Amino acid sequence: MTAKTTATGEVWFGHPLVSGKVPVKKNLFEEVIHATGILELVPVFPYLDNGAIVPCLSVSLGRAGTQRFQFFHDNVVPEVLLCLAEKQGALKAGQMMVLPNLHGVNNFLEDLQDESAYLVVLITIRVNYQDEQRERFLIRCEQCNELLYQRYQNIKHGPARPYYPEFYALAFYADAVDEFNASDRTCPKCGHVQPPFPTDQMGWRRYAMQVRVANQARADAERFAGQLEEKVTS
């Protein structure tokens, strides 16, 4: 099979191109630079529409003051995890697994305070074709595993982003932990008071804010360019 490039506007590796999409090549290790938080889930490609396969880069780093955390995530579609590289990680390079729909998430480092420790993984999901794709965020008691908090969200619902799409799940996670941290956090079963979730470590809120700023800045630049063109032609 002969591969043709997008310059032909017709096919890519023998298959018709999807309207509005072109093949994109990314260096996953270079993409680590764009991860601003622990396990942030940075979408590698700009395609988040219905049916899209969405690989997300996830990075854990050891550093002084890093807090251990644990939450649970429930998705209606399977996730595939591939460990790309690690040092003192609970996962090993080359390890791949299909995660159950409900699974736990934590730092995955043996020593959180070791600044040389790191873990780089690729987590891939698929966006379904329905109007709704629900995810659930859960926190359990660190002492007895009792369910303390859960929140559901349609991750397809969010602010319109005309230029650069947003992976809405990250703002959902940020909202969830803010709500949990503002709650009593006392376990109804054993009485243990759960510590606040270390939301600042995660980068979720920063990602959502930066997507908003990128779209707003582009819109302002487009408007300014239009004003300049009107002055030139008038």
Image (spheres, rainbow, N blue to C red):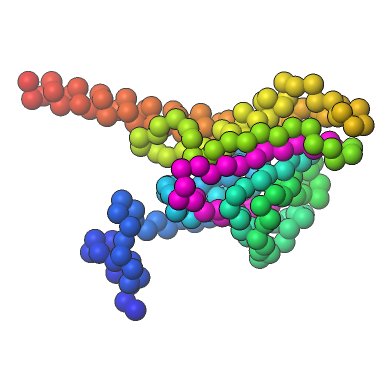
Quadrant of the drawing holding the C terminus: top left
Residue 196 located within the stretch drawn in magenta: no
- Which quadrant of the structure image shows residue 115? top right
- Residue found 65% across the figure and 30% down from its top: 176
Q: Which residue is situated farthest in the right direction here?
A: 190
- Which quadrant of the structure image shows residue 85? bottom right
Identify which residue, 194 or 25, lies in the foreground: 194
Q: Which residue is situated farthest in the left direction here?
A: 234
Count of numbered circles on the image = 0
Q: Is residue 33 visible?
A: no
- Residue found 67% across the figure and 57% down from its top: 99
- Residue found 60% across the figure and 49% down from its top: 76
Identify which residue, 202 or 36, lies in the foreground: 202
Quadrant of the drawing holding the N terminus: bottom left
Vertical placement of residue 56 versus 139, above or below: below
Vertical placement of residue 78 versus 139, above or below: below
Residue range (magenta): 117-142
83 on left or right of 192: left
- Residue found 19% across the figure and 22% down from its top: 227
Vertical placement of residue 88 versus 143, above or below: below
Q: Position of residue 218 (x, y in %)?
A: 34, 31
Identify which residue, 82 or 149, lies in the foreground: 149
216 on left or right of 136: left
Q: Position of residue 72 (x, y in %)?
A: 72, 43
Q: Which residue is situated farthest in the bottom direction here?
A: 1
Q: Position of residue 86 (x, y in %)?
A: 70, 56
Q: Position of residue 183 (x, y in %)?
A: 75, 22
Specify the principal SS of the magenta part. strand
Q: Is residue 158 visible?
A: yes
